[in-house]
Amino acid sequence: MSYAVIVTGGKQYKVAPGEYLKIEKLEIATGESVTFDRVLLVANGDDVNIGAPVVAGATVVAEVISQGRHDKLSIIKFRRLKH
């Protein structure tokens, strides 16, 4: 099993080939590819490369499928009548 750990938007994500990932909005059009060059870890079976802080020469290429927003959250603050 091969996977990598990348950094984007100040967060770390574990990615693998053929996976779908939901990340922060990027300024890239739908259908284009994006290259992540901040790769912290690359694992291919038992062969694991850990960067200090990034793995030299490692990149992850992904395709932007869609862009959108999450569902709106409703926050309710309960106030009792007798304070």
Image (tube, helix red, strand yellow):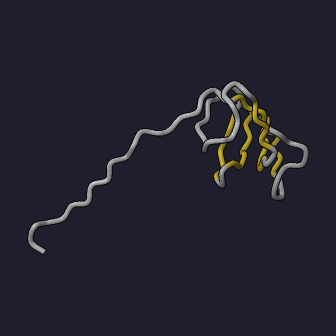
Q: Residue at x 66, y 55 (%)?
A: 10
The residue closer to the viewer here, 46 or 38, is 38
When asked about the image quadrant of residue 72, the answer is top left
When asked about the image quadrant of residue 77, the answer is bottom left
Q: Residue furthest left?
A: 82
The reply, left or right, for residue 23 in relation to residue 78 is right
- Quick one: quadrant of the N terminus? top right
Q: Position of residue 79 (x, y in %)?
A: 18, 65
The reply, left or right, for residue 75 in relation to residue 3 is left
Q: Residue at x 81, y 45 (%)?
A: 37
Q: How many numbered discs, if any?
A: 0
Location of residue 78 with respect to 20 vertically, above or below: below
Location of residue 65 with respect to 25 vertically, above or below: above
Q: Position of residue 52 (x, y in %)?
A: 83, 58
Q: Residue furthest bottom?
A: 83
Q: Position of residue 41 (x, y in %)?
A: 77, 47
The residue closer to the viewer here, 34 or 7, is 34
The residue closer to the viewer here, 27 or 21, is 27
